Amino acid sequence: VDSLKGKDLLTLFDYSKEEIEDLIDLAVDLKKLTKAGKCPPLLAGKTLGMIFEKHSTRTRISFEVGMKQLGGNGMFMHARDLQIGRGESVYDTGHVLSGYLDGIMIRANSHEMVKELAEHATIPVINGLTDIYHPCQALADILTIHEVKGYTKGLKIAYIGDGNNVAHSLVIAAANMGMHIAVATPEGYEADEQIIEKAKAIALQNGGSLFVSNDPIEAAVNADVIYTDVWTSMGQEEEAKKRLADFKQFQINDALVANAKSDYMFLHCLPAHREEEVATSVIDGPNSYIFQQAENRLHAQKAVLASLMA
Ligand code: CP
Ligand code: NVA
């Protein structure tokens, strides 16, 4: 995707509908080529630095493997081992890393910090999850819906759960695809209002819609896709007990999915907690695409890496 060369990926708000669609198309191509053992070495000799302030399985491994498959190198760094973990400035870190690396992927506590890093780094910075956004996840989610349903425009997607980073990026991506989006959260756990308003405008522009409520059933009615995430995100562990109680009515279980279309897809970014946010019968049932979705992190991110860094 030529227009993305040298750009950052901090939030999908910075990308046009065409750019997101082109990334999905490129991901489809790269997935096919990779499965045929013919992934082109578009990033030969390039190194992606991968900084983590939080745990990760999918993000870490899919970025590292993705770089390798594209002929380059992914370098894992835990933030606490870097000098930034003992107070070196983001300004200096951004400048120094730009001298060694061709791109940075960062999973951070604060989106503000990632923005600051991107400001001072002269190489592309990719958001691997912050407190507000998880754009790489949303690209993999759209890719998965596209693969399973054959299209995305006009489909109804219900996000039921915490109005968190995953929810924010999902609604932005789905809005660009012209999907009909329903977000249901418990009171007090709503998604960010400004993000919802901006995403709603994008959805309307593309023939879709966006609707928020505190009613999981209303959201699930007639849905083509039902999506949830954990009730307690990384860093919120001390709220876990209260959240378990507050989210009780929002579990994705057989009774709730009975409201959706019979061929609905269940998606979850993972990691999941069976019998908390989702019943085992749903997440391990025939409508669940969670492992295809997890694999698609690799393919979607390779499209991002190739577009930003080649
Ligand atoms: N979905 C996701 O980002 O998973 P990890 O936390 O394992 O990277
Ligand atoms: N909302 C979760 C997503 C994990 C991939 C978190 O931030 O922990």
Image (cartoon, helix red, strand yellow):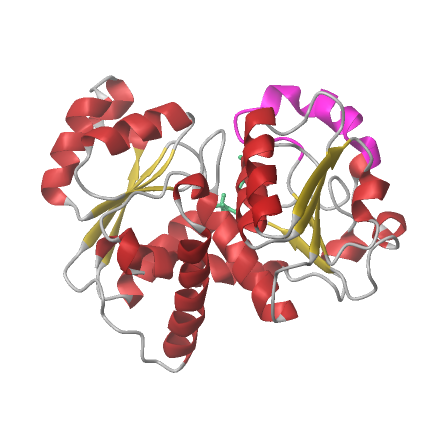
Quadrant the N terminus occupies: bottom left
Ligand 2 is located in which of the four quadrants? top right
Q: Position of residue 285 (x, y in %)?
A: 76, 62
Instruction: Look at the image and say whether residue 233 sits in the magenta stretch.
Output: yes
State which quarter of the image contains the C terminus.
bottom left
Please name the residue shown 39% across and 41% down the image: 14
In the image, residue 153 sits, relative to residue 206, either above or below, namely below
Q: Looking at the image, which is closer to me, 54 or 15?
A: 15
Asked if residue 130 lies left or right of residue 242, the reply is left
Q: Viewer-proximal residue, 236 or 199? A: 199
Q: Nearer the viewer, residue 156 or 186?
A: 156
Work out whether 66 lies above or below 36: above
Asked if residue 164 is among those painted magenta in the image, a careful observer would answer no
The stretch of residues the image draws in magenta is 231-249
Whether residue 275 appears in this view of the structure is yes
Res. 271 in view: no
Q: Position of residue 271 (x, y in %)?
A: 58, 46
Quadrant of the rendered image containing residue 31? bottom left
Q: Position of residue 209 (x, y in %)?
A: 67, 45
| Residue positioned 43% across, 77% down in the render | 32
- Residue 12 location, x and y as percent? 44, 43
From what the image shows, is residue 195 above or below residue 2?
above
Q: Is residue 147 above or below residue 83?
A: below
- SS assignment for the magenta stretch, majority: helix
Judge from the rendering whether residue 29 lies leftward or rightward of residue 221; answer left or right: left
